[in-house]
Image (cartoon, helix red, strand yellow):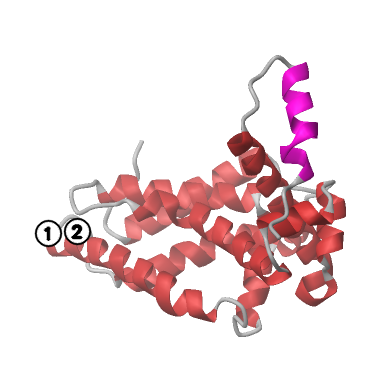
Amino acid sequence: MTLQPESETATERQEADSRGRRYRPGRIRERNRECIIVAAEQEFAQHGFRGTTIQNIAERAELPKSNVLYYFSSKKRIYHALFDDILTRWNAVFSEISPEDDPAECLASFIRTKVELSRSHPLVSRLFAMEIIQGAPFLKDHLRTNMREWVRGRAGVIQQWIDEGRMANVDPVQLIFLIWSSTQHYADFQVQILMVENKAEYEQRDFDHAADFLISVILRGCGLEPPK
């Protein structure tokens, strides 16, 4: 029997009616799914995959366990969805690049977006790092298929820019690795950075400065002038 989330029935209809809004199941599903992902991020970061239970996630998301199971049939599916969400966010801005685009604009936008996501989603970045350090037990298939294909596609566009003389002759795959590692450093090694710089916590200007620095160094290393 398919479980019907309680929050998509009477409770949510009442809430919508009380605010004078039309009941929209799609919006409710979106909101619930986002609540589950955010709660899972915190639980997995605190307890690891093995130490986290669906009940823990449900309690943190303030949803019945049955609702969580309606959206995700297992803890493993939540874990995969969490990584799928951040990988999509990380790479979205660079996924649609084409040979006709400006390489400096594309690379700068990619770097700035990745640094900003290190600010807004540091926990899942560290979870991803731990998953990779442990040999990617849950992400092997994704890395060998989707991720490999994505990198080859982006590297192909970069290579075309190089062949057309629009940027220096650099290794496209290594360039992608460099951007990934340098931008995620601000999430994965936050404690080290704050201690070395004698800060209690990051400020927005720290991320803005980091993005500007990386854009300047990486683009000039590619023979490109950073966008104004």
Q: Can residue 207 be seen by looking at this rendering?
A: yes
Callout 2 amino acid: Trp
Mark 2, residue position:
161
Is 19 rendered above or below residue 13? above
Residue 130 horizontal/vertical position (percent): 67, 74
Residue 113 percent location from the top left of the image: 49, 47
Q: Which residue appears at 63% of the width and 45% of the height? A: 206
Q: Which residues are magenta?
A: 6-18
Whether 125 is among the magenta residues is no
Is residue 188 visible in the rendered structure shown here? no
Determine the secondary structure under disc 1.
loop
The main secondary structure of the magenta stretch is helix
How dense is the environment of label 2, judged by Cα within 10 Å: few (below 14), some, or many (20 and up)? many
Residue type, label 1: Glu
Q: Position of residue 167 (x, y in %)?
A: 22, 58
Hey, which quadrant is residue 77 in on the image? bottom right
Examine the structure image and report whether residue 11 is included in the region drawn in magenta: yes
Neighbour class for label 1 at 10 Å: few (<14), some, many (≥20)? few
Contact, CB < 8 Å: mark 2 with mark 1?
Answer: yes
Q: Secondary structure at mark 2?
A: helix
Q: Is residue 86 left or right of residue 16?
A: left
